[in-house]
Image (cartoon, helix red, strand yellow):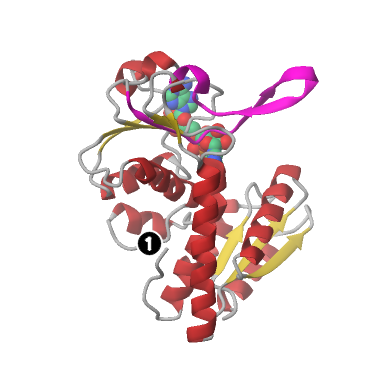
Amino acid sequence: MSARIIDGKAIAAELRIKVAGEVKRLTTQHGVTPGLAVVLAGNNPASESYVGSKAKATKEAGINSFDHRLPDSVGQAELMALVKKLNADPAVHGILVQLPLPKQIDAQQVLDAIDPAKDVDGFHPVNAGRLASGLPALVPCTPLGCIMLAKAVHPSLAGMEAVVIGRSNIVGKPVTQLLLAENATVTVTHSKTRDLPAVCRRADLLVAAIGRPEMVRAGWIKPGATVIDVGINRVPGENGKSKLVGDVAFAECAEVAGAITPVPGGVGPMTIACLMVNTVRATCAISGLPAPAV
Ligand code: NDP
């Protein structure tokens, strides 16, 4: 294996320490303690696990954590009323509604109801539009984490040939906008792209956000390229247990790439750390304070 392994776990841990420092500064110097409200409707086991990890990281950073658990049978009106209440609550600076929502709920209507200033997931159309317009915005956490990992290898991404696989609103599109903001030359690919391996071989920086286990093969990688693997796929492992793999065939691609993120331990840990970053950024903006040092 020749590639440098980009240690997302270590980079995320450093970032969380910086966030905790900023939270302490805001609390002691300005009397403002950031607050994050997380809304979980239903009992999806994966969502419960994510929400648990978020609550733990929130408390460790010194951020006030407000958990709202609602039954699977929750109605649209009840959920909308909760969002309205959180929008108006001065102790809450960030609101995260965990997806997926129960099937009777119109999720877009709920997300659209979140005050864009408290939209720490960065999914509100106002924040998506501001990002696309090059204006300050709350940016989705996973794409923000991808850029931080790429910059851990290349402090400047200016002029780099970047290829993004995937065009979802959650990952592909925002990561594309962030790469443009970093002055990379970006190609966005998707399921209708012709000769995807050839397009990927042009990339100095390849971001894979597909949701297909180990689809990206060694022959798709330009020698020395940096590879950011966003994929989280559960596949059958040994002894009847399942294991997590990314969208990139890690072992073979690591032979060709210059640097690569592992799964797990790459992009995943950055997502929660960036949620903490967004909560502190939202707190400063709402409180009329200068942007934090994270
Ligand atoms: P989506 O399913 O919303 O989007 C997948 C994208 O990949 C689409 O744009 C789709 O193209 C494209 N795609 C699918 N198949 C192919 C193919 N054969 N060739 C080229 N492109 C293809 O997924 P998400 O963006 O939400 O997530 C992507 C991955 O990232 C998943 O594995 C997910 O689990 C993971 N993830 C990880 C996070 C983390 O914290 N690390 C957070 C969020 C997601 P088209 O638009 O044409 O359909």
The residue carrying pointer 1 sits among few (fewer than 14), some (14 to 19) or many (20 or more) residues within 10 Å by Cα, namely: many
Seen in the picture, residue 292 relative to 233 is either above or below; the reply is below
Residue 267 among those drawn in magenta: no
- Quadrant in the picture for residue 52: bottom right
Residue 241 among those drawn in magenta: yes
Q: Residue at x 51, y 20 (%)?
A: 251
In the picture of the structure, the residue carrying the numbered disc 1 is: 137
152 or 167: nearer the viewer: 152
Q: Is mark 1 within 8 Å of ligand 1?
A: no
Secondary structure at badge 1 equals loop
Residue 142, given in percent of the width and then of the height, sits at 49, 47
- Quadrant in the picture for residue 158: top left
21 or 209: nearer the viewer: 21
Residue 256, given in percent of the width and then of the height, sits at 38, 19
For residue 254, side relative to residue 27 (left or right): left
User: Hey, what amino acid is under mark 1?
Assistant: Ala
Extreme residue toward the left, this view: 159
User: Can residue 119 be seen at all in this image of the molecule?
Assistant: no
Q: Residue at x 51, y 27 (%)?
A: 247
Q: Residue at x 33, y 27 (%)?
A: 225
Query: Which region is colored magenta?
Result: 224-253
Q: Quadrant of the C terminus?
A: bottom left
For residue 232, side relative to residue 29 (left or right): right
Q: Residue at x 38, y 61 (%)?
A: 137
Seen in the picture, residue 229 relative to 194 is either above or below; the reply is below
